[in-house]
Image (cartoon, rainbow, N blue to C red):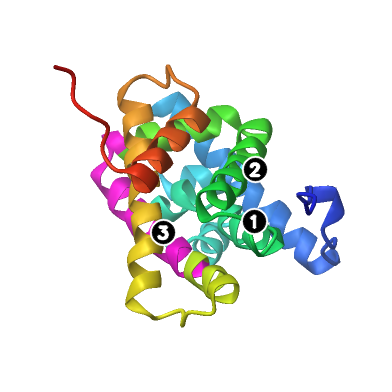
Amino acid sequence: MLAVTSPADRPQPGLRERKKIKTRRAIRSATYALVAERGYDATTVQQIAERAEVSPSTVFRYFPTKEDIVVTDDWGPVVAQELRSRPPGEAWADTLRKVLRTALDLSLAEEPEVTRLRTRLGVEVPAVRARMAESMAATGRLLREALAERSGLAPDSLELRVFAMSVMGGLMEVSQYWAETGHRDDIRDLVDRALDVMEHGLPSGKP
């Protein structure tokens, strides 16, 4: 079985790219801190820029809208990369479980409170929820490309489009359910339950 790569195993970016990453993270960190202090609607781009020690134009250069700051993360490419690293003969359900758990483990290890805040905003703020859906559609396209390499199907085939967006739609519902229930469950367990539904269909109702 192929080993899952860690951030330390991946090629390290050059100086220019590291500066961009640092700026992006500063803007995101400032946004989340301000939202936690003041609420989403009361947080302005001007305040974000001041807290991140950049200009408002720099904020907009990295993130076209305030919603983009909230929903943008670095895990879409990680999911695609991990998907490509899995053994070719591995069952689809097993592959998705392992890849998604890897991404969740990394996210929760690095920024657990941010992950919870993002999902809560996705429930409470319609603009964030709409942008989150658009972002997940973009991640779905990355997923389709990686799945195409493994399956031999065309990335734009109906089958891959339906499968990839079923996965992304399921993850969107997991995110909303997790936030609506006060983050009381382990989101990794919720993802496993969602994949069970995709693999086996709806469970039998209680008599």
Q: Is residue 40 magenta?
A: no
Q: Amino acid at mark 3?
A: Ser
Tag on residue 6? Answer: none
Q: What residue is shown at x 41% (from left), y 33% (from top)?
A: 193
Residue 126 at x, y = what percent?
A: 24, 44
Quadrant of the image containing the C terminus: top left
Q: Amino acid at mark 2?
A: Thr
In this view, the residue farthest toward the left is: 207
Answer with left or right where residue 135 lies relative to residue 173.
Answer: right
Is residue 53 something one can see in this rendering? no
Q: Is residue 138 magenta?
A: yes
Task: Look at mark 1 in the image and give the residue it sits on.
Answer: 78
Residue 36 at x, y = what percent?
A: 46, 27
Whole-number angstrom distance, CA of label 3 to CA of label 2:
20 Å
Q: What residue is shown at x 40% (from left), y 81% (from top)?
A: 156
How many residues crowd mark 3 within 10 Å: few (<14), some (14–19), many (20+)? some
Tag on residue 135? Answer: 3
Label 1 sits on a secondary structure element that is: helix
Whole-number angstrom distance, CA of label 1 to CA of label 3:
15 Å
Q: Amino acid at mark 1?
A: Val
Label 3 sits on a secondary structure element that is: helix
Residue 44 at x, y = what percent?
A: 41, 44
Answer with left or right where residue 70 lies relative to residue 85.
Answer: left
Instruction: Identify the mark nearer the N-term, 3 or 2.
Output: 2
Whole-number angstrom distance, CA of label 1 to CA of label 2:
9 Å
Q: What is the span of residues highlighted in magenta in the rendered image?
A: 123-142
Task: Look at mark 2 in the image and give the residue it sits on.
Answer: 102
Q: Which tag is nearer the camera, tag 3 or tag 2?
A: 2
> Is the C-beta separation of discs 1 and 3 under 8 Å?
no
Please determine whether, in this image, residue 130 is positioned above or below residue 126. below
